[in-house]
Amino acid sequence: MSSPLILITNDDGIFSKGLRHLVKLINPIAKVVVVAPDSPQSAQSHAITINQPITCEKIDVDDGKQIDFICSGTPVDCVKLALAEILDRKPDLCISGINHGSNASVNVIYSGTVSAAVEASVHGIPSLGFSILDYSETAELKHADNFILHLVRKMLDKKSNVCLNVNIPKFSDKPISGIKVAKQAKGKWIEDFDERFSPMGKRYFWLTGNFINEDDALDADQNLLDKNYISVVPVKYDHTDYSKLDLVNNMLND
Amino acid sequence: MSSPLILITNDDGIFSKGLRHLVKLINPIAKVVVVAPDSPQSAQSHAITINQPITCEKIDVDDGKQIDFICSGTPVDCVKLALAEILDRKPDLCISGINHGSNASVNVIYSGTVSAAVEASVHGIPSLGFSILDYSETAELKHADNFILHLVRKMLDKKSNVCLNVNIPKFSDKPISGIKVAKQAKGKWIEDFDERFSPMGKRYFWLTGNFINEDDALDADQNLLDKNYISVVPVKYDHTDYSKLDLVNNMLND
């Protein structure tokens, strides 16, 4: 049997530790093609580039047998370009990450990492988005290696068209408790903009804020992460709120 | 009773015809505050600006009694900034649009217009995203005025925390068939990148593609629009695919 083909991308940029770690981990079990952004694209969500062109070039990163392409677009652009222009066949799996920072709870809607995985699933490709709860560029990542490999092997084996948002606890003395299927925890960011003035007196703001977990369910991703579990949330791109169809129908016809 | 407070934003930019038309339509029934991007932000999805600061200034557009703020950020940044820094109380409604171009079917996941409305709903604010199936900057918009006002009044009346993705057929000789609650049609874009070379020989790509409607359900938004109905899809930001929880559980424990 020929080697599976795995597309790897991310939103922190092609040289980020999280992506390079993932490539080294996956190289032995698949043919890996990396198509990833040339610059940090955090919080780019499902943005695509329509008002300017995108460049994409093969580069030699020289850290393994994978093939690397560096792209000027967003994470979702990278996936679109990989599928339409770079890969000679549909990949068996698309993996995005490992993102430096959490994509649990409401973070998923802002996430470039998960959106890249979602874009693959739009095209019928099973996909995984990995994120670690550590924003540091030098985050320790090895503690999740076996879990990541297990999940990748299962995804290759089952071939289900499912998109999984996987969050990994930050490295600590405490071993990982396990891996659990979860739902997106209810939560939100309360913004606290940092207001400043330029030397010319022009006002500007830096976006900062605090995350509020509003969910106490045991199977909410944020709560599992708090107990040192890896959380795995299946994600879909049908955003219809089916529970509200009747309410809206009544409202329109009232 | 005091006038309701309505926040208006969009993704085409503060001077776009769609937004200015909406402002004129809503001014008579509410206190309107506009916080909108200074430049086109189409297809920015739920992107937020975290690696650079944002500017936001009051400007005098002089086309009505509303108050206008022009912002350097994305549509979602505009909503966050409005709620945290500009408005003195939580608005009764947030309206995004009118977008020049469709946000039906899978377009919703790329849409800055709908994402701005979704961001408001994260903060518990009822919200509406309006889009017209006409990309022209001078699109005719008046044919939907009565439907838009009806919907806005209903939303103010019911105060339900619901976020609605509303798409409006392009103006034609045919009158609008009506307004219907819908679900997001299954569909996708098949990319067809336009490959070019710069004068220096560097390869670049323009993103282009064709939309494929994969849904034949009568209540799918794309199909209602094809029959000249206005489609109204309730949208949620819990992206968990609950239908796949068992499948993923079995996969992990197999």
Image (cartoon, coloured by chain):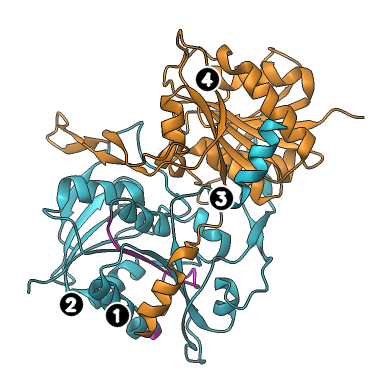
Chain colours: A orange, B cyan
Checking the image for residue A177, the label placed there is: 4
Q: Is residue B4 magenta?
A: no
Q: Nearer the viewer, residue B146 or B174?
A: B146
Question: Gap in Å between the C-alphas at discs 1 and 2?
Answer: 9 Å
User: Can the viewer see residue B222?
Assistant: yes
Q: Which residue is mark 1?
A: B149
State if disc 4 and disc 1 touch (CB < 8 Å).
no
Is the residue A40 above or below the residue A140 in the image? below
Point out the stretch of residues depicted in magenta.
B124-143
Local secondary structure at mark 1 = helix
Q: Nearer the viewer, residue A176 or B117?
A: A176
Q: In the image, are marks 4 and 3 on the same chain?
A: no
> Looking at the picture, how far across and down is residue B191, in whole percent?
68, 53
Question: Gap in Å between the C-alphas at discs 2 and 4?
Answer: 55 Å
Instruction: Classify the position of the N terminus of chain B by image quarter.
Output: bottom left
Look at label 2 and name its amino acid: Ile
Q: Is residue B129 magenta?
A: yes
